[in-house]
Image (spheres, coloured by chain):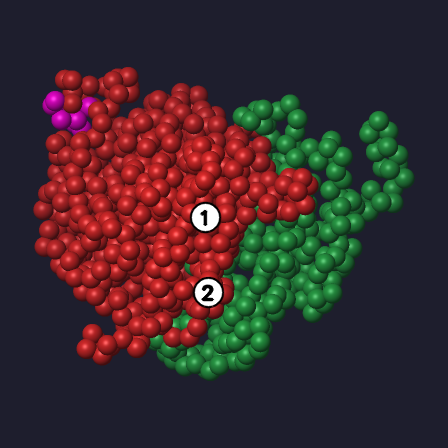
Amino acid sequence: MSVVDRQEWDVVVVGAGGAGLRAAVEARERGARTAVICKSLFGKAHTVMAEGGIAAAMGNVNSGDNWQVHFRDTMRGGKFLNQWRMAELHAQEAPRRVWELETWGALFDRTKDGRISQRNFGGHEYPRLAHVGDRTGLELIRTLQQKIVALQQEDFRETGDHESRLKVFQECTVTRVLKEEGQVSGVFGYERESGRFFVLEAPAVVIATGGIGKSFKVTSNSWEYTGDGHALALLAGAPLLNMEFVQFHPTGMVWPPSVKGILVTESVRGDGGVLRNSEGKRFMFDYIPDVFKEKYAESEEEGDRWYDDPDHNRRPPELLPRDEVARAINAEVKAGRGSPHGGVFLDVSTRMPAEVIRRRLPSMYHQFKELADVDITAEAMEVGPTCHYVMGGIAVDSDSAAARGVPGLFAAGEVAGGMHGSNRLGGNSLSDLLVFGRRAGLHAAEYASRAGAPRPRVDDAQVDAAAAEALRPFSAEGGEPADGPPENPYTLHQELQQTMNDLVGIIRREHEMEQALRKLAELRVRARRAGVEGHRQFNPGWHLALDLRNMLLVSECVARAALERTESRGGHTREDHAAMERTWRNVNLLCALTDPSGGLAGTDTVRGRITLTRETTEPIRPDLLALFEKEELVKYLAEEELYE
Amino acid sequence: MSSYEARFKVWRGDAEGGGLEDFAVEVNDGEVVLDIVHRLQATQAPDLAVRWNCKAGKCGSCSAEVNGRPRLLCMTRMSVFRRDETITVTPLRAFPVIRDLVTDVGFNYTKARQVPAFVPPEGVAAGEYRMTQEDVDRSQEFRKCIECFLCQDVCHVVRDHEENKPAFAGPRFLMRVAELDMHPLDAAEEAGLDRKRTAQDEHGLGYCNITKCCTEVCPEGIRITDNALIPLKERAADRKYDPLVWLGNRIRRR
């Protein structure tokens, strides 16, 4: 049917944020011919939005820091649901991944003795975040982008072609991972610019597509975050892990409406900013949960002393993990103590001189000045929770980043699950991208070289099916009138966002999630009729119509898993099951396609498409458990886990 | 909240040609031009092509021209215009149109490849890099660049002179040369690469006559002309004409 351009590569990386680019660098350095595919221009990925820093226990500012402390903080932040081997590898390897960036040209802020400076952040015991002002993500993406260019310059010198071993296919979208005999054989996608289809044949595919935030109305995420990689993996037969855990960052802008959700970096609090309600009270002191009581200051005086003397004082509760702060803000607003536009006040103006604020938080100063007419050196910001990150994701092997159940498929970064448990600490995302991006690239390259010849060939029937699926929105207008009128993809998207925001948001209730699942079923039926005008050349309406498939699939996963988990933990808060239950500590929820036969199951309608299974997690290795005090472990672990 | 209806003219078309199309569209408090473009997509022109990502002035994707001036659509607030004003949105003029507000910015990626990468110092292991804040300040300013390419679009050397493009890297990539040249640990010189000379000979620094248009348009407030281009020019000039510097270099190289 369709004549589709085909190319052969060893490794295909889907996504060009921090994880995707780090994977591509590694795969290419290991000798694999590597293609990177990204929806936006090269260098624009969502990683540029990361502000605070990269968590790595280098111990440059406080020499007491080491990987064990970082590991402990990460497990506590994730409420012990983390895939512990990932947390261990992450804590151990993060410093090397940061130092390596310097050899590629990165310029971090410095300590007095010329080393990489590190800043405080929520949930981290010591100053740990390598940073560049509040634009660390930009530095990370630019450094990796420039490293890719450096490798291409090397290849040009040797082969006369910049793209002979490493090529970036920018502004392209992948709609299917292709398989032959159960193994990955390549990807199918389209060029956004021309609308032309293409197939990249490769034995190994790394998914590094980031998150799902665009399924929620108030979000800090960009348009790209439509859960593509999550959906690609599901459709290819790989399960998703613990999708109920969605992080609502406590501090997003709330005013004006057009910027609602845009992130206000945690560095504001790390550097001394405080949260106040409409009565002027620093309310976070009322919200320190029992499991963290010993670690946080009891009075404002103690909290304030901590910034200068962290060894003899405890940190202020504004620096609790994000889930705690987000819930607290939500509760204050609900109790009628919110700010005029439905948030709370975040104030640095009374805490630091104006010139220090402008130097340490330049982007925030700029952002509020330009977008909200607020001078943060003179007045408080208004902030409230915003959908920021998904902890759940593709179930992977900790060491190799290989997706479960689909040989040749790998995943790294936000799209992979497990690393952060039920809640991610700030700063652990950028380090996650580097550590597991590298591991995914390494193992994908090894897998591709083992795959040898002959490689699985992509058969035409699959390509035709994928092409038909992608073209469907153009014929929706001419469908049977009995099915109903064509639907506007933008309207469907808005309804989906409102549904997820209102019914599967920061605080969840059983009947609301059931209602959400019914609404999702309705939207799925209507999405079949999502029609588009115009032609295939750079047509955002068409692109959105295709992205809807992914958002609907992923939203169903979130809602089903959230309904199933009858406890509150990290990024999953149930009003009807408010306590964290030790019996749930070692339970993973896996989402898989009900009908894994492939084909076009992704567009099936009425009945839900996701089946949930429970799985008991692997016991935490004893030497890692021994890093914690027994008194702390009893708060998290079930009886039988403690006495094994 | 007060809403009103604004009048817009948006360029629509492709490489074959096109023209301005009229729209009347709702505007609410606090909105930026990108919000209005999104409203047009959702309600009147679903296939209107525009690039955007972060909507917070951090990614540099939504560059276009508003009333003839290069701007980020996400950082241009509607409140800067009078309510009775017709707002004209057109694609970046210096680059070929793909469709509507989307242009082919491939020129910039080609130029990026022509600037030799950072050269790590030999014998300094990862983790052993030591630099003072004062020494990294200068290059850090240039690394704030979000690659929106507004400076490339506004620069008169290429804006209306397609023929200059092969020889001229543009402010963004001359600044990249300056950034690497001022990097405290860049070992290009030890590797036999004179970045200042290449700025002049290979990247067209001589075309720049310091009109500062790039500095004025930069949404990050980077002082491209004063801090990158002029120092680079001075250093390149030293190299080229100062016999003492020339002699010193000859001796040091031995």
The residue located at (69%, 64%) in the rendering is B158
Q: Nearer the viewer, residue A467 or B157?
A: A467
**Horizontal placement of B22 versus A284: left or right?**
right
Other residues around mark 1 within 10 Å, as few (<14) / some (14–19) / many (≥20): many
Distance, label 2 to label 1, CA atoms, is 19 Å
Which amino acid, mark 1? Glu
Specify the label residue B192 is tagged with. Answer: none
What span is colored magenta in the figure? A633-640
What secondary structure is marked by label 1? strand
Q: Nearer the viewer, residue A611 or A426?
A: A611
The residue located at (18%, 35%) in the rendering is A615
First-in-chain label (2 vs 1): 2
Chain assigned green: B
Percent of width and height locating residue A581: 13, 34
Which secondary structure type mostly characterizes the magenta part of the structure?
helix
Is disc 2 in contact with disc 1, using a CB cutoff of under 8 Å?
Answer: no
Which amino acid, mark 2? Gly
Quarter placement of the C terminus of chain A: top left
Residue marked by disc 1: A201
**Chain letter for the residue marked with disc 1 in the picture:** A
Quarter placement of the N terminus of chain A: bottom left
The residue located at (12%, 42%) in the rendering is A566
What secondary structure is marked by label 2? loop
The residue located at (34%, 59%) in the rendering is A465
Percent of width and height locating residue A209: 39, 48
- Please say whether residue B120 is one of the residues in the magenta stretch: no
Position above or below: A79 against B79: above
Q: Nearer the viewer, residue A57 or A84?
A: A84
**Chain letter for the residue marked with disc 2 in the picture:** A
Chain assigned red: A
Residue marked by disc 2: A195
Given this view, does label 2 or label 1 mark the residue nearer the observer?
A: 1
